[in-house]
């Protein structure tokens, strides 16, 4: 399902992808931490640094902020795209009313 099938502009598609990437950025590090790091507590490969410093929380927060900003910009873009035809229609009606 591509953005063109939905009738979205290039900007709207970009912002939709940005918000989805933000969601992925916020989910993936947390899942990796829970699945990988928690199981390797005694591992000599250096996984302990992740348990002492909540890097996964920082990346989850950054990803959430990217997702929220992308979603808000996407919503604003869609509203603007929906209002543009209405304004054109209103303008056309006004021109027709002026002719009569």
Image (tube, rainbow, N blue to C red):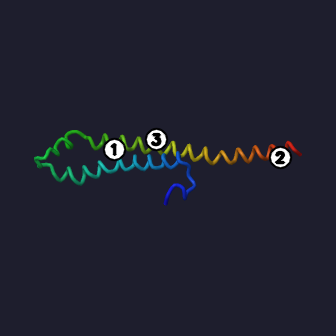
For discs 2 and 3, the disc positioned in front in the rendered view: 2
Identify which residue is drawn at 13% across, 47% down.
45
Observer-nearest residue: 3 or 33? 3
For discs 2 and 1, the disc positioned in front in the rendered view: 2
Residue 96, label in figure: 2
Q: Which of the two labelled residues, at mark 2 and mark 1, occupies the earlier sequence position?
A: 1
Q: Residues within 10 Å of mark 1 (few under 14, many from 20)?
A: many
Looking at the image, which residue sits at the far bottom? 1
Q: Residues within 10 Å of mark 3 (few under 14, many from 20)?
A: some
Looking at the image, which residue sits at the far right? 100
Q: Residue 65, percent across and down?
A: 41, 41
Residue 60, label in figure: 1
Q: Residue 10, percent across and down?
A: 53, 48
- Label 2 and label 1: CA atoms lie apart by 54 Å
Against 21, residue 2 (above or below) is: below
Q: Secondary structure at mark 1?
A: helix
39 displayed left or right of 92: left
48 displayed left or right of 30: left
Question: For mark 3, what is the residue?
Answer: 69
């Amino acid at each position: 399902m591509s953005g063109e099938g939905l009738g979205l502009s290039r900007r709207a598609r970009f912002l939709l992808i940005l918000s989805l990437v933000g969601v992925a950025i916020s989910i993936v590090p947390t899942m990796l931490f829970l699945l990988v790091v928690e199981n390797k507590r005694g591992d000599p490969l250096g996984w302990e640094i992740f348990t002492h410093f909540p890097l996964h929380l920082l990346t989850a927060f950054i990803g959430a902020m990217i997702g929220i900003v992308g979603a808000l910009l996407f919503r604003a873009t869609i509203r603007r795209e929906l209002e543009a035809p209405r304004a054109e229609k209103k303008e056309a009606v006004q021109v027709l009313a002026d002719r009569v």
